[in-house]
Image: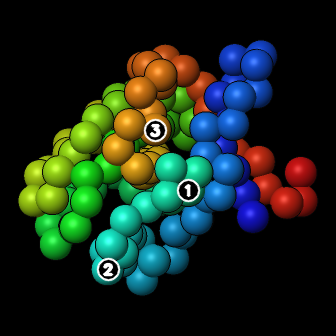
Amino acid sequence: MSRILINDGSDAILVEKLILAESTPALMRGLLGRASLPADTGMLLRPCRSIHMWFMRFPIDAAFLDQEMRVLKVARNLRPWQLAFAPRKTHCVLETASGVLETIREGNRLRLETDSD
């Protein structure tokens, strides 16, 4: 299992259980069909330039990240049927339960840690 940490020296765990969506079907499906998302779980869509909330059942937070995992924008409490537009240099998007990204700000760097690390 992979996880996301805040790369600020504290190595605080932001997402303990990370789902990687890297194939075309996984990117298209995203979180669709889920009734909820536990607070310790997130999905990293990579590569991904934008997201939508069509047919979603619950609100989420989304962090738009560049190739170095730097936060370009945080969209908080996105509700079903909303759109979120990504900044130009977006490479991937981290989706979490609403409220999880409360402490994350533009410019923060995140770190992906996998089982092999």
Q: Which mark is residue 100?
A: 3
Query: Which circle's residue, 2 or 3, is located before the other in the chain?
Result: 2
Query: In which image quadrant can residue 48 be found?
Result: bottom left
Rendered location of residue 11, percent (x, y): 76, 27
Task: Report how far apart the C-alphas of labels 1 and 3 lie in the structure.
Answer: 10 Å
Distance between mark 1 and mark 2 Cα atoms: 16 Å
Q: What kind of element bears circle 1? A: strand
Q: Position of residue 116 (x, y in %)?
A: 89, 59
| Residue 49 % position (x, y) | 34, 51
112 left or right of 45 in image: right
**Is residue 2 at least partly visible in the picture?**
yes
Is residue 24 among the parts visible in the rendering?
A: no
Q: Nearer the viewer, residue 32 or 48?
A: 32
Report how many numbered discs are placed on residues in the image: 3
Write the residue at 49% across / 58% down.
Answer: 38
User: Which x, y percent locates residue 12?
Assistant: 71, 28
Tell me the kind of residue under disc 3. Val
Q: Which residue is mark 2?
A: 33
